[in-house]
Image: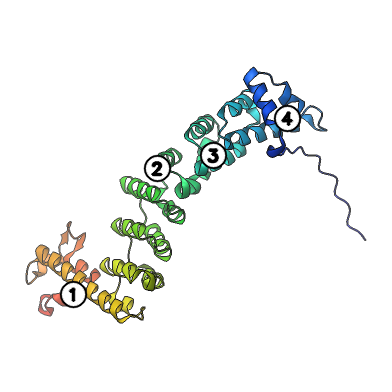
Amino acid sequence: MPFPQRPQDHRPAFDAATLPWPALAQGCAAGDASVFDALWQNHKRPEQARAALARTVFAAACAKGDVTTAKWVDGLYALHIDAKTLRGVADHVLRLGPDQVWDFICGKIDTHHAAVDIYKSLFKTAAEHAPAARLEKVFAQSTEASGYLYAAVLGDNMPALTWLLDKAALEKNIQQGDLDKALLLATERAQTPMVYALLRAGADAGAFEEAAIKRAAAHSAADNGTLMEILVRAGAHPDKAASQVQSRNIADRLIQAGQETQNHHAQVLAQACGTPPVREKLCAYHPALGHTGLHYAAENRVLHHIPRAVFSTKD
């Protein structure tokens, strides 16, 4: 038995590429909507056709940078410029559009009842592609900056990453997991400036069982182990790093970097807790260390610099 035929789809559709743009521009300049109206009045469903045409011309004019025509259509049939159209236009303009179009479309979104939802839907695109000024506009009503660090990395958008890190730090809502996942992605893509920025912001170089080291190792032949050394100096395990490379020179350099890093942390610990360290100071919290002395020593692999006699069973 054959499947029943679906009824022919008579929903109106317009192709922006085939619209009479010179005539539309003339009508816009003269304030004459007749050329616009002539395109939809003879359609089988004229009301739907008018709405579809208004959205098509509005979106295409914005994509072309023609704010004048977009404003003209908006003035004629503003009710047909719905949230979906505004979202689509804004997404395109964030990537490619000039400032005058961005300012115009933001003005439209700001007065729409779904403005918050529209901007929220643009977060990922903004983090990937937008300059800082546009990013700030999109995120104005949000505190979710930390969750979009990965998007800035995906778009190789260093200004956006810097802005997101600053905003998240200012609002004190930066999440360790977001930092660590973004670091992993930046390491995998060999985005060295982003790796530096994320580590400075507090990303854990040894997170996910030294996963960043494993990804950096894939680039060691091309960058002579630079990424791996950055991670080791930030706290990744030097022995595990050295075991990931075939070059003896790189492996030796990673071990040396680990030793230099440990020596640095031992000096910092000594400044806070004394030489040899005093047990009471080891057990005390030190703002400069961000931990108790004992936790700082353990986290930075310098417990062996502390004489065993200093410790108690409880320690």
What's the distance in space between the residues labelled 2 and 3, CA to CA? 16 Å
Task: Please state which of the two labelled residues, at mark 2 or mark 1, is closer to the viewer.
Answer: 2
**Tag 1–tag 4 contact (CB < 8 Å):** no
| Callout 1: SS | helix
Label 4 belongs to which residue?
50
Residue type at mark 3: give it. Answer: Ala
Determine whether the residue tagged by mark 4 lies in a helix, strand or loop.
helix
CA gap between label 2 and label 1 equals 43 Å
Residue at 29% in and 74% down: 237
* Residue where numbered disc 2 is placed: 132
Q: Are marks 4 and 2 in contact (CB under 8 Å)?
A: no
Q: Earlier in the sequence, mark 4 or mark 2?
A: 4
List x then y, in percent, for residue 142. Answer: 43, 42
Residue 176 placed where, x, y %? 36, 58
Residue at the spot of label 3: 90
Checking the image for residue 303, the label placed there is 1
Mark-to-mark CA distance, 4 and 3: 22 Å
The residues tagged by marks 1 and 3 sit, at their Cα atoms, a distance apart of 54 Å
In the image shown, does 92 or 26 lie closer to the viewer? Answer: 26
Q: Earlier in the sequence, mark 2 or mark 3?
A: 3
Q: Amino acid at mark 4?
A: Arg
Secondary structure beneath dot 2 equals helix
Going by the numbered disc 2, the residue's amino acid type is Ala
Mark before the other along the chain sequence, 4 or 3: 4
- In this rendering, position of residue 167 left or right of residue 99: left
Between the residue at mark 1 and the residue at mark 4, the CA separation in whole angstroms equals: 75 Å
| Disc on the earlier residue, 2 or 1 | 2
